[in-house]
Every structure is written in C-alpha cells, then in structure tokens.
Amino acid sequence: MIAVPISKPIHILLVDDNPNNLKVLAEAIHKCGWKALMATDGESAIEQTEYAHPDLILLDVMMAGIDGFETCRRLKINPITENIPVIFMTALSDSTDKVAGLEIGAVDYITKPFQHEEVIARLKLHLKISHFTRTLEERVQERTAELTQSLQQLQQTQLQMIQSEKMSTLGQLVAGIGHEINNPVGFVGGNLSYIEEHVNNLLRLVSLQQEKLTQSDSEIQELLEEIDLEYLAQDLPKLLASMHQGITRLKDISLSLRTFTRADISSQIKFQIHEGIDSTLMLLKHRLKGNGDRTKIQVVTQYGELPPISCYPGQLNQVFMNIIANAIDAFDELHQKNSNQDITAVPSIITITTSLDPQQQTVTICIQDNGPGMLTEVQSRIFEQSFTTKAVGKGTGLGLAISYQIIVDKHNGQVNCLSIPGEGTKFIITLPM
C-alpha cells in the first residue's frame, strides 16, 4: 500500500475578550474543516502565536490590556510571527482607524456584527493569498539557488577554458622557442669543443716556436708585446669556460621551459614535484634578482624525499608560478611603498618546503614568504575569480582562482592560505599521491 501524504491542517488564531464571539467564530471555522486556536488578550495571543505559528489571525481591536493595534505591531516586529496574516475585527467605522491598522501590517478588516459568509469568504481569500505568497517565495529561493549554481558552473567552465587555452598557447609558443634555441645551441655547443681544441693546439705551437727560435725578430717581438701573449694564453681558456657555462645555461632554460609547460591534458602522468618547482624558479630567476632599491630575494628549498605522483605537471607548474610570482610582486610593492625607509636589514626570503605523509598518502608543498602579509578580509577572497588588490594592468585576479581549481577540482587536493599582516603569507598545498 502506498502511503498518501496528509496535508497539514489549517490553524486560525481567534483573539477576542468576548467568549461569545470566540464561540461563534470557532463554530464557523470548524465547519470549514479548519482548527481554531483561541486567546482572550493580546499578551497570550503573542505567546501562542510564537509556538503554535497559526496560518492566520483574527484579531479584535478593542480589548483589555494591550489593544489589537499594539498586539499587531508587536507581531509584525517579531521575525517569528511577522509573516502571519492578521485580519482585524472591529465595530469601528472610522476609516482613519482602519488605515492605521493597515499601516501597522494588517491585511484586512471584518466588521462586527459578523456575517458568517463574509468572514469565511475573507478567510479563504487571505489563506489563498498567503499560500500563493509562500509558494512564490519558495520558487524564488529555488530558482535563485539554481541560478547561483549555474553561475558557479559557468565561472568554473570559463576558468577551465582560460586555463586550457593559456596552457595550449604557452605550450605551442615554448615548443617553437625551444626548437629555435636548441638548433643554435646545439651548433655552438658542438663546435665549441673543436674551437677549444684548436686554440689549445695554436697556443702549444706558439709556445714551442718561442722555445726553438734562437734569434728574436723585432717585428715578432712588437706583436707579442701588442697582443700580450702571456695574458692571452691565460684568458682564452677562461673565455671558453664561460662560453661552456653560457651554453649549459641555455640548455637548462630550454629544459625548464619544456618541463614547465608540459600540458598532458588528456591524462595524468607520474611526475617529480621537485622538477616542476625547480623549473619554475629557473624561469623566475631574473625576477628574484635585485631590482632597483629592492635587494635580491633569497629562495630556500627544503625538499623532503618525495616519490613521483600522478598529476597534470603543466597545470601544477602553473600553480607554483602563480604563488611564487605573487610573493615577488608583494616584495616589490612593499619596497615601493617604503622607498624612503631602510628596510634592507630584513632580507626578503621565500621558503619552499615539501614533505610526505605515508599514512594519509599525501604530498604537501608549503610556499612561504616573509613579505607584507594580507588583511583578513583580503585573505578570505583571494581565491575568488577576478578579485585582485593589484593596480589596473598589474593583475587579472584569475591566477589564484585558476590555481584553486587546478588543485581542488583537477587533483582532488587542498590549498589553504595563512597570512598575518606584517609577517608574511603561507600557501599550503596538499595533493593525493
């Protein structure tokens, strides 16, 4: 057997200090299948309304104690009872009193002596209006919730599209740059070893000729003094060593670019987090250097023993880039604001710590700076889309919103921010292994 839901019975509170009026009204209400609640004064009516919460109140105007107007006023200022319809019962015919009652919050008037048909008709009308009002409010709330959810989904989709397009464009750009870099780097690097060998052979030949020649030619002697052969023999190996370092640096940059922009959008792969952090720091190396009055930003890495984890490497690297770049921006803004003060005594430091929790099977990356920190109201909004404290043209407000989506939605992880004004900011990223 299917249980049929039973609708809630309608309760009407009758407030009148005349027992005969209450009896007559109660009988009429019962005939309609409604439940009658009764009170003989304003105070008990207010108390009963708070716990019984009737669907409608019939309220006499002239009563001992507080009258109907005052009773209605108190009901309407109480959040628990303010939405219950109130109909005044009165023998008054003065329109001024009726207007005053309507201004207090009553929905209608019933004039004594009662006409039963009129009373029931007015009760049905206002019960129907009250029902429609509640239903409309519920529908508005439901629709508002649906629209809010749709807006959030739209914002998430927009962020995903922006992030995917950004990584795709960046990946194509870096692939082209990497190809252009690798060709000349490979050419120069390949020939550098031959140049080094040839130079060493020439220096050996000159040295041997100087030993074998018994007579010194004046023209040769002048050229030797002009080119400072001894200095040249010492400096050439150093120049070649510097060129080797430059080639190695270019190779490292190219490798960092490829590591940083690894898209791997279709599926997660095993990736060593430390490689991603190191490639990010390599690309930000130029910004970590001293900038005008700002001293060099020190980066301290405290890496734990981490195994490769399943992730989207390119997206995680983007998170590291956003957080570390924001820390650098904060140091820059701090020094601009305090350009007339000596704050170089306190070094600017970014500390990156990684650790493994074998029991929880999680990896934690902590990126902390000793910069200016953030106010509580700013900290509570930093992951909101398009929220930024930077000047126009300095930031879009999408970086941390995208970072949050990458960590939480893409990797089922967590990202939290702890910040104290004047002491610094810490981002804690937790990723499942």
Image (cartoon, helix red, strand yellow):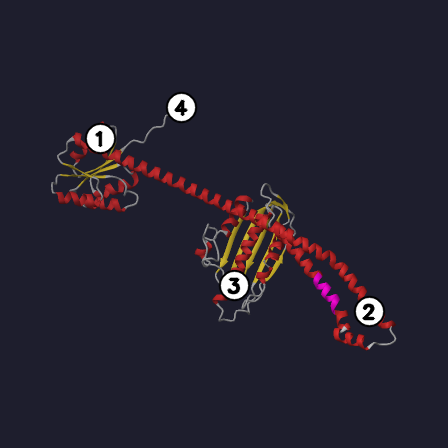
Mark 4: few/some/many CA within 10 Å (<14, 14-19, 20+) = few
Q: Which residue is mark 3?
A: 332
- The residue depicted at 58 percent of the width and 52 percent of the height is 365
Q: Nearer the viewer, mark 2 or mark 1?
A: 2
Q: Which residue is mark 1?
A: 29
Q: Amino acid at mark 4?
A: Ile
Which quadrant of the view contains residue 279? Answer: bottom right
Real-space CA distance between mark 1 and mark 3, rounded to the nearest whole angstrom:
76 Å
Q: Which residue is mark 4?
A: 2
Q: Nearer the viewer, mark 2 or mark 3?
A: 2
Q: Nearer the viewer, mark 3 or mark 4?
A: 3
Q: Secondary structure at mark 1?
A: helix
Q: Secondary structure at mark 3?
A: helix
Q: Amino acid at mark 1?
A: Ile
Query: Which one is nearer the viewer's eye here, 146 or 90?
Result: 146
Q: Earlier in the sequence, mark 2 or mark 1?
A: 1
**Exactly how many numbered labels are in the figure?**
4
Position of residue 422 relative to residue 340, above or below, is above
Real-space CA distance between mark 1 and mark 4, rounded to the nearest whole angstrom:
31 Å
**Residue 64 seen from this side:** no
- The residue depicted at 18 percent of the width and 34 percent of the height is 22
Position of residue 253 relative to residue 311, above or below, is below
In the picture, measured across the screen, residue 269 lies left or right of residue 382, that is right
Magenta stretch holds residue 96: no
Which quadrant of the view contains residue 101? Answer: top left
Q: Secondary structure at mark 2?
A: helix
Q: Which residues make up the magenta segment? A: 235-243
Q: Nearer the viewer, mark 1 or mark 4?
A: 4
- The residue depicted at 71 percent of the width and 60 percent of the height is 244
Real-space CA distance between mark 2 and mark 4, rounded to the nearest whole angstrom:
109 Å
Real-space CA distance between mark 3 and mark 4, rounded to the nearest whole angstrom:
70 Å
